[in-house]
Image (cartoon, rainbow, N blue to C red):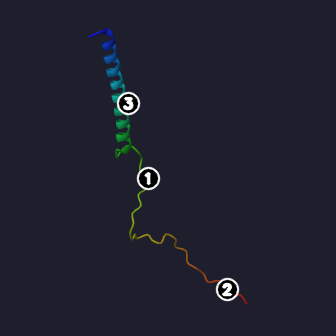
Amino acid sequence: MSVAQNSGMQKTVRQFLVALTACLAVGAGAAFAVSPGSAPEGPVQHAGVTVDWPHNTATATPAPPVN
């Protein structure tokens, strides 16, 4: 093999390794972003009947009649 072929092969391998490293970094970042323990959870809201509904306990007072 000539020197030109060796340097061309080295350049190709180097570019492949850089691309592989970039893809693995992006993949690892995506896996970390969607992993269950990666982000704090907010309050969970469940649909359905609860014992503390309605939240307001104010009683309505009738308005005085207007003449």
Callouts 1 and 3 close, C-beta under 8 Å: no
Q: Left or right: where does residue 5 sit relative to residue 46? A: left
Instruction: Give whichever of 57, 40 is nearer the camera.
Output: 40
Task: Give the amino acid at mark 2.
Answer: Pro
Distance (Cα) linking label 1 and label 3? 32 Å
Q: Which residue is mark 3?
A: 22
Ranked by sequence position, the earlier of labels 3 and 2 is 3
Q: Residues within 10 Å of mark 2 (few under 14, many from 20)?
A: few
Task: Give the amino acid at mark 1.
Answer: Gly
Ranked by sequence position, the earlier of labels 1 and 2 is 1
Please, what secondary structure does the residue beneath circle 1 have?
A: loop
Residue 39: where, in percent of width, then height?
Answer: 41, 45
Q: Report the mark closest to the observer, 1 or 3.
A: 3
The N terminus sits in image quarter? top left
Compared to residue 33, the image places residue 18 above or below, namely above
Q: Left or right: where does residue 26 sit relative to residue 58? A: left
Instruction: Give whichever of 35, 14 is nearer the camera.
Output: 14
Q: Which residue is mark 2?
A: 64
Q: Which residue is mark 1?
A: 42
Residue ID at (34%, 44%): 35
